[in-house]
Amino acid sequence: MKGSTYRRCSCRDPKSGKEFGTSCPKRNSRNHCTYSIRQELPPHEDGSRRSFARGGYTNAKAAQADLDHVRALLGLVEADDPEGIQLVAEMLAEVSGEKLLLPDVEETRRRLKAGQDLVGSLTVAEWLDRWLAGKRIRRSGISRYETDIRVHLKPHIGHRRLDRLRVSHLSEMFTAIADGNAEVLEQNAQRRAAVEELATIPWKGAENRARRKALRAAIDAMPAFRRVTGPATRQHVKATLRASLNDAIGQQIITFNPAAHVEIDPVRKPKALVWTDERVAKWEQTGEKPSPVMVWTPEQTGAFLDFVAEDRLYAMWHLIAFRGLRRGEACGQPWSETNLDRHSLTVTGQLVQDGWEVEASEPKTDSGFRVVALDDDTVGVLKRHRKQQETARAEWGSAWVNTGLVFAQEDGSWLHPGKVTDLFERLVAASGLPPIRLHDLRHGAATLMLAADIDIKIVSDTLGHSDTRITRDIYQSVLPHVGKSAAEATAKLVPLQRKSEEDKARKAAEKAKRAEKAKAKGKKKGKAKKAARKG
């Protein structure tokens, strides 16, 4: 195909305003004109012409080098490969039109063989936007991805070319996030100190009022209190990027996923602890919880259920405490999937929050779809609840909102999961019991089932876990009496000589003690007989 280099002068006639072109009086001066190249490209599919054109070269050698580069790229495709010819032509046309750097010949050869895009100018930010727009998941999941992308990924790596993203870039990003955490903590401490100082300044007196005004202005100028980006959030950011890059590999845009190889701090999930008497005593003294995840003992659970026996949503608290339903599952459980005659309910949906908005959704995983067996007491509680709901429905009349849900507001409309959590926390505080979260009722249900020697597979299925290992890792916080029984049973399996000798000594001491008691008793009887004879 035709191609050439040529000199070009952009000087214009001051009178006419037209370019001089080859008639420029300074054309023969050294370094006056620039060089340009033009290379014919394979025509469009409709037969129309297209070409690669570029100018601004300072000398003929540089222009010729780029022309040779363009021809080398065109030579990558055989004449009997019309699809490849069109791909290379489109790539060169885009590079020419966008004034991009000419791609490396060997890299282009590799991309052709791999079936990847030939122009690697797509940025991480552009790809993340495209990837997010194509996701078809529930709204709350989209919101979480969008937050990761907007707050963390775009600001740190959004400007980088997708095909040139490296593990080192991601390491730098997470280091920057950690540095940002330190800055947030420092700013929070400064603002907290200023607020505490403001609280100590008296209101009366002109000098005090001036100090308060100045300090208030300083506080207003400080950044607001912010949360740090914790290990769990960093792991989620990494997971979001990894998922998006895996899709890019699937679409043959890239061949390597750096997010799969970057190392960050692992998430240490808090262990579930039981509210023992010792922990309750310390909490009463200090107000501090031993762990973010706390579980009531059976006695404490019973005390709470007794305390809330007259609450309108008692049946919900009872169901979560004994059967371990998640908050959203309980809020979204329909009567149509609740068979009290067969002592079971089927979890087929849930109500989830997106910000403060609520939407109905299916369970996140296949294991979330499950049948939960109900005991006689729970069935009785739900039957009473149904009667109360039918009474309320009659009272509301035409204003009743027929959602068909087991647990609803007074008028039958959806319960807001966030408001349910708030209500639970108020009830716990009023009961005087040590604090737990609503989700910790689910922990308690799992612990009770495990303590009752229910098979781990049944416990896992009841909770909707995909693997019994999840159940063991998260929920097996052993109750004190269960742990002691296990310890005693284990100790009896190991015969020890020391224990045998201790048992002999203990038995001998008990025998001697019995003999001494018998002797003392005999003496007492003897004295009684002697006294009787004298009498």
Image: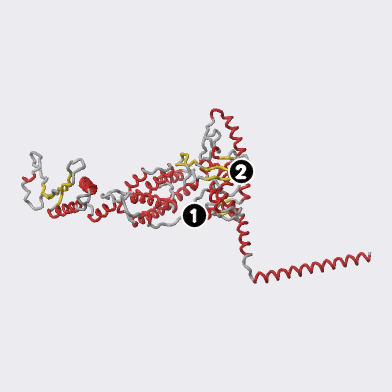
| Residue 46 visible in this rendered orientation of the protein | yes
Whole-Å distance between the Cαs marked 2 and 1? 32 Å
Q: Is residue 232 above or below residue 417?
A: below
Q: Amino acid at mark 2?
A: Thr
Pinpoint residue 116: horizontal percent, then vertical percent: 29, 50
- List the residue tagged with mark 2: 378
**Left or right of residue 471: residue 431:** right
- Residue found 45% across the figure and 41% down from its top: 354
The C terminus lies in which quarter of the figure? bottom right
Q: In screen coordinates, is 358 left or right of 73? A: right
User: Could you say where residue 176 lies in the image, as x and y percent from the top left?
Assistant: 37, 54
Say whether disc 2 or disc 1 marks the residue closer to the N-terminus: 1
Res 285 seen here: no
Is 362 situated left or right of 245 in this image?
right
In the rendered view, tell whether residue 533 sits above or below residue 218: below
The residue closer to the viewer here, 11 or 132, is 132
Could you say whether the residue bearing mark 1 is in a helix, strand or loop? loop
The residue nearer to you, when weighing 95 against 453, is: 453
Figure quadrant of residue 335: top right
| Secondary structure type for disc 2 | helix
Q: Which residue is mark 1?
A: 269
Of marks 2 and 1, the one in the foreground: 2
Residue drawn 18% across the image and 41% down it: 47
